Amino acid sequence: MTPSLVETPLRPSHTAPIPVTTLAALAGATVLRSPDRTLCRISDQTLVTGITLRAQQALPGDLFAALPSLLPGRPHGADFAGIALSAGAVAVLTDPVGAHRSALTAAIAYRPGVPVLVHPDPRSVLGTLSARTFGDPSTRLTVLGITGTAGKTTTTYLLEAGLRAAGAHTGLLGTVQVRIGEALLPSTFTTPEAPDLQALLALMAERGVTHVPIEVSSHALVLGRVTGTAFAVGAFTNLSQDHLDFHADLEDYFAAKAMLFDGRARAEVVCIDDVWGQRLVTAETTTVSLSGDATWHATDITALPSGRQTFRALGPDGFDQRLVMRLPGAFNVTNALLALAVGHTSGADPVLLAQGIATAEVPGRMQRVNRGQGFLALVDYAHKPAAVAALLDAVRAQVPGRLLVVLGCGGDRDTAKRPLMGAEAARRADLLVVTDDNPRSEDPAAIRASILTGVRGVAGASVAEIGDRAEAIAYAVTRARPGDALVVAGKGHEAAQEVHGVKHPFVDADVLADLLDGVRGVGE
């Protein structure tokens, strides 16, 4: 397997140098100097112009954050200090264990005078240090954070489209991509690591961006990736089972999401259509509900045969306007309301926001694949039980025919949701094809067996098991008839399928399009 090339990190063109002692004082870190590990005098004027936690991406002038691994048995970041220092890093931030790793000791021995900042929990201060290093860019932007289980990506896209229509110069940070104005970049994490996030925000500010919708994951909140970020608005979509491989239970998961509402956001917008959102409401909260008593709510929702829908949005100051959306499903009405509420709370004109929302499409979210096949074909990222149920309910309401579903579950993730996802799909599908998603290091057959455990509890379910994802999609395509709907769920926008550490190119929408072209060609 050919090693991948190391990408040059995205940085602003200029960063004002900061004395390392300023950063040490900000973090409350002890400064040591090699090789004898004596305390460094506070007069040390080593200047820092960047920060990274990836040794392979270190640039001259960087502070290298050598963090302990989150997973047992993995190397400590300090083991890669030699790579970072050889690339020009001028200082190291680590924990007491890292400070005495032999690899760091050896690397420092060749570079006498390189200061080592020691903190008992360096990850907890990394966000603050990253923000300070890159000039606290969030204070020069209107950063709009969206958290919750489902709807984060769609809401950020709707919000960004609305803000553009309202005249803002926008950026976007999330699961699918990073956007800086018109420039598109792939995304690795839902929320980037703190140094990458702050560098991106600084680059956006440098390029004239004014407003940045950003997805905020529970991992990002717990691991401090957004510490140091000033949010103009924090928003909550909903909460359902997910990431229980990382969180102890749903209560722990909710506590992580609730961190966005601990005062770090100047204003808060919350969907109150579940009990979790209701728990976040204070006297100052702007509330959103599909139909309930809230600051923003909707009426007269109408699904159109084209898959679009219309609804009346009602908001503060007498706002009452009919919106048209390209995305089907009641949950997307909620997402649109949330986008309206966040945009309005940030100061944008809601009439213009609505105009932009009407034009928005989201890669891998209710994404239509139309090759003249005579039936509705969709690709969606739904990979949680509640998301699968909401997706299929929305599609069922749009079509007169049968509902065919292709579904898998990812490996090395929350195992408890697999039978639940299978059951939700089986209850709604006229034909369910269980297949592979991203098995990662797990046995794909074992993952499918877990999904089928839930399927077997649904009386009368029609199900097929086909491990090869392309073959599974093909099987469903050949069985779809005019008036039906075919949904390929789970991977959405993803461009690869990961099997035993190898990522194979695979885009659901492209595979589906090629198969639909073949079916259409046969009939012509």
Image: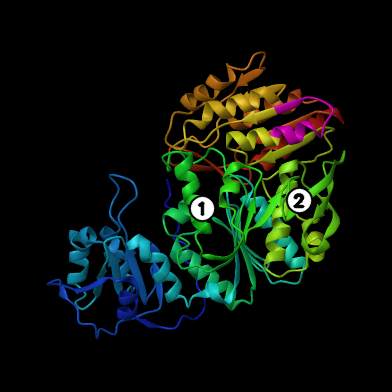
Estimate the x, y position of residue 14 in percent, counting from the top left: 49, 81
Estimate the x, y position of residue 150 in percent, counting from the top left: 61, 45
Q: Which residue is mark 2?
A: 297
**Three-letter code, disc 2:** His
In front of the other: 488 or 151? 151
Asked if 178 appears above or below 402 in the picture, the reply is below
| Residue 183 in which image quadrant | bottom right
In front of the other: 346 or 394? 346
Estimate the x, y position of residue 507 in percent, counting from the top left: 63, 43
In front of the other: 330 or 23? 330
What residue is drawn where x is 55% and y is 56%?
Answer: 187
What residue is drawn where x is 40% and y is 78%?
Answer: 49
- Which quarter of the rendered picture does the C terminus lie within? top right
Q: Which mark is residue 239?
A: none
Task: Decide which of tag 1 and tag 2 comes sooner along the chain.
Answer: 1
Report whether 289 appears left or right of 143: right
Q: Secondary structure at mark 2?
A: strand
Q: Secondary structure at mark 1?
A: helix
What residue is drawn where x is 63% and y is 53%?
Answer: 270
Which residues fall within the magenta stretch?
392-404
| Residue 174 in which image quadrant | bottom right
Q: How is the image coloured?
A: rainbow
Asked if 226 appears above or below 486 in the picture, the reply is below
Q: Which residue is mark 1?
A: 258
Question: Is 406 within the magenta?
Answer: no
In front of the other: 474 or 122? 122
Question: Is 397 within the magenta?
Answer: yes
What residue is drawn where x is 22% and y is 67%?
Answer: 107
Question: How many residues crowd around disc 1 within 10 Å: few (fewer than 14), some, or many (20 or more)?
Answer: some
**Three-letter code, disc 1:** Ala
Residues at circles 1 and 2 in contact by the CB criterion of under 8 Å: no
Asked if 417 appears above or below 138 in the picture, the reply is above
